[in-house]
Amino acid sequence: MPQIKAPQETAPAADNSGALTFRSSDEVAIRASDFSFWYGATQALKGISLQVPARQVTALIGPSGCGKSTFLRSINRMNDLIPGIRHEGDIELMGRSVYRSEQDVVRLRKRVGMVFQKSNPFPKSIYDNVAYGARVNGLAKRGSQLDDLVEDSLQRAALWDEVKDRLKRSALGLSGGQQQRLCIARALAVQPEVLLMDEPASALDPIATQRIEELIYELKNDYTIAIVTHNMQQAARVSDFTAFFYIGELVELGRTNELFTTPREERTEAYITGRFG
Amino acid sequence: MSATTAARTPREQRRRVTSGLMLALTGVAALLTVLPLLFIFFYLMQAGLGAINLAFLTKVPAPVGEAGGGMGNGIVGTLIMVGAAGLIGLPLAIGAGVYLAETGESKLANSIRFIADVMNGIPSIVVGIFVWAWVVVSMGHFSAVAGAIALAIMLLPMVTRTTEDIVRLVPAELREGALALGFTRWRTTLGVVLPAAASGIITGVMIALARIAGETAPLLFTALGNSFWETDLTEPMAALPLQIFQYAISPYDEWHRQAWAGSLILISLVLLVSLGARFLFRSPYRES
């Protein structure tokens, strides 16, 4: 396996993500610097350097096995559970390393919510699904305070109207799309700053997908969102920035409208026009 | 379908017949496997049902030569000792099972898993002798608590391994969902994984309790048995399997009848618990 190192002789801004000029209003929420990652002997990420701007949607696209999900799961350190992993380089959240020794992963994950490919509501009531995380994290006690938080989270996830009459029923009775929005509500109830979404609509039908996409568009007013998707139309529709990953490397990061119309890299063009991947 | 049937070659025909034959053979094997249970049950009904009446269920054994009497003390003794064994063994076994499932392949976990499997294979009479040496001898006399400890030791490996298997079946996504919300591992296990696994664990527990309820050998040198009502855990206590054993090896016809009846009660208890475990608790994931 070729050991490809991102050029570091110059400033980190000199790599291909640095070619992107952020507006001064684009506050950086997540910054990866020469981040590499290994599962045992297999290198999954090679010197990734990129910036995810705050309160925008950044899509991570690329063919299967390109490392986009690994990168996403490195941000909230969900990969920590896997034995035999190791990393080099760093990822910062709001200017502070998530891998610094005194970083508490539990607190990190509270700040960085995550929505998974397969909706994974707890086998509890709809209400408890949303309330549980908030209660565990001490955000609200029982009673009206918690009721308000549950309602607010379900409202934000555009699910309230559909479930307000059956909050005490099992979440497993909801449709796939509703379950996924419930998982978003559950993540929002913990009041994160960043929302990571790992192919959140890949198991849903087109109508449920559209609802999730509309929701993402709404949520970016308040949250920084990074979304992994296999669906390039989806990336084009929902995101402000798009990062193209290929075999563990970041090939190109750009404003979505530019990346899809005038990609700088030949591999990006080949991928988005369907010539490989 | 009919078009291909017409064109079937001899070779295809042979393969079809072989396949059908093999399938039928495994079906016969399956039937023969469950046949003993049916035989046992019907034989017990025939031999024991006549001796079951209210007195049998509520009275203590009558002295030799006297008609009547029953195994009420044995039934209660079994329930007490199985309950006590559960109180001692279940928290340990469930905790150990959760530990094994959550830590995965660490060296310690692998050693514990291996030891639990070995424990599962220890003959129950050996467990009885072990508890006799450690508990009965140091207490100075036989006791129900010694019986309960012996049964608990039988329970430990069974429940540990079933708990581990069931907890492992909980979808990884569920665990990740909780961790991603900022739950600690302990909170994830307690609040999300265990409730999702609860129905399966309870089923495993009930089946294990049903199994130890029928154990005789671990009680022979521990609880000993008792012809009278005894609910004090520090005293020797009657148990249904012990009483069946004593009555079955006795020379009296009346006692033989009662041994059959006791066996019928015991197997009914076990069947009821197993069926209850099957019907009362279903995994929330199996329906979808």
Image: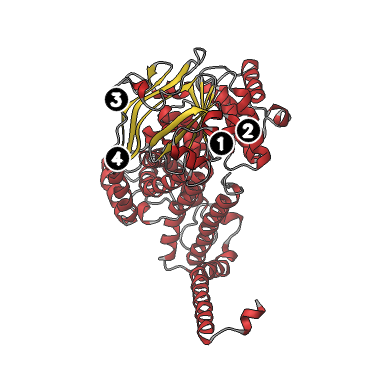
* Disc nearer the start of the sequence (2/3): 3
Which residue type does callout 4 highlight? Met
Marks 3,4: beta carbons within 8 A: no
Question: Marks 4 and 1: which is nearer the front?
Answer: 1
- Judge the density around disc 2: few (<14), some (14-19), many (≥20) Cα neighbours within 10 Å: many
> As rendered, which of A153 and B277 lies closer to the eye?
A153
Which is more toward the observer, B119 or A219? A219
Front tag of 4 and 2? 2
**Looking at the image, which residue is at 54% across and 52% down?**
B273
Of discs 1 and 3, which sits in the foreground? 3
Q: What is the CA distance from the residue labelled 2 to the residue labelled 3?
A: 39 Å
Identify whether A265 is placed above or below B120. Answer: above
Residue type marked 1: Pro
Q: Secondary structure at mark 3?
A: loop
Q: Nearer the viewer, residue B214 or B164?
A: B164
Q: Nearer the viewer, mark 2 or mark 3?
A: 3
Chain hosting mark 1: A
- Which residue is denoted by mark 1 in the rendering? A200
In the rendered view, does A156 fall on the left or right side of A116?
Answer: right
Say if labels 1 and 2 share a chain. yes
Q: Which residue is mark 4?
A: B139
Q: Are marks 4 and 1 on the same chain?
A: no
Pointer 2: what residue? Answer: A212
Residue A8 is marked as 3
- Distance, label 1 to label 3, CA atoms, is 34 Å
Q: CA distance from mark 1 to mark 2?
A: 8 Å
